[in-house]
Amino acid sequence: MKQLEKPYSGTQAVLRGIFLLKTFTDEKPTWTLAALSKELKLNKTTVYRLLTALESEGLIRRNLDGESYSLGPEMVVLGARSMRSYSLRDVCHDELKELAELSGETTTLEILSGRDVLILDEFRGPHLLGAAPSLGTRWPAFATSTGKALMANMSEDELANILKGTLTQYTPKTITDPARLRKEFVEIRKRGYAVADEALELGFRAVGSPLFQLDGEIVGAISLGGPVVRFPLQRLSEFGRQISEIAKRISTKLGHQVAS
């Protein structure tokens, strides 16, 4: 056990809480107050205060015996968020890089952020003319291929939150009618990919497909996009099937059981 000593001013309680949480392991998932006090070399009153604070936030739970403690449900939530935000990029990296190199177009990994999608990773093709987004860029979900791929697989409550209010008309091809979008979502679920045909910017088309993890929860979406001169309408289904197959492979790596 790492010694709790010489912390920066004001951080002692935080460090103690962190070390307490790290004491719970696969080998020893439950602890009593007395055992934690001995392990952390802190008095029982201090440990009890830490446990009480962590329990109030769901990071620690008291077991039914009333004497022992375990990690709480919020630890599961935080762990899942961590995996989605970090390992997701690692799992997608090689697939997106290879697709960008083979197609010559831009590939992205995007996640939902409020009513927008946010670029978590991207690879650009070698062409001078092409998409030039940057990491952290946000786009309105309803007008992008990744956003529509995500929305098509959302719960009704989540979907209603994005479709509420005014949907901006970015180009003459932007669909702003929620009823039309919902109809399109049915088709997206059937074919496995979404299309953004100059909906956000004239001259740019993209296809996007959703990513699922072990429990079937949607965690993000990937896209392939480029200028209309290299992304003709007659090739959209070809590009769409391509991005869909890659999304299925990535989802399998994330533990999702993809239906054959």
Image (cartoon, rainbow, N blue to C red):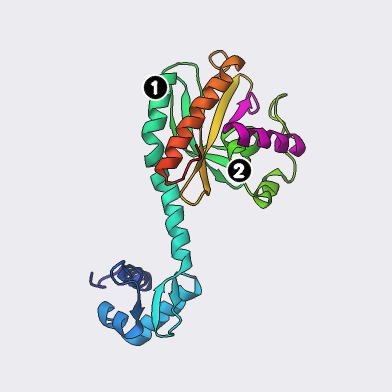
Q: Which mark is residue 68?
A: none
Residue 27 place in picture, x, y as percent: 28, 69
Is 204 on the left-hand or right-hand side of 24? right
Is 128 on the left-hand or right-hand side of 8? right
Residue 63 place in picture, x, y as percent: 44, 79
Instruction: Classify mark 2: residues with Cα within 10 Å, few (<14), some (14-19) or many (20+).
Output: some
Please give the range of residues in magenta: 178-201
Residue 60 place in picture, x, y as percent: 43, 73
Mark 2 or mark 1, which is nearer the start of the sequence? 1
Q: Is residue 10 above or below residue 134?
A: below
User: The N terminus is located in which quarter?
Assistant: bottom left
Disc 1, SS? helix
Q: Which mark is residue 153?
A: 2
**Which amino acid type corresponds to the residue marked 2 in the rendered image?**
Asn
Q: Is residue 61 above or below residue 34?
A: above
Between 140 and 66, the one lying in front of the other is: 66
Callouts 1 and 2 close, C-beta under 8 Å: no
Between 242 and 141, the one lying in front of the other is: 242
Q: Is residue 121 above or below residue 3?
A: above
Name, please, the residue furthest toward the top: 229
Between 182 and 225, the one lying in front of the other is: 182
Q: Quadrant of residue 236?
A: top right
Q: Which residue was labeled with disc 1? A: 101
Determine the CA span between mark 1 and mark 2: 29 Å
Q: Is residue 11 visible?
A: yes
Residue at image point 46% right, 44% down: 257
Name, please, the residue furthest toward the front: 260
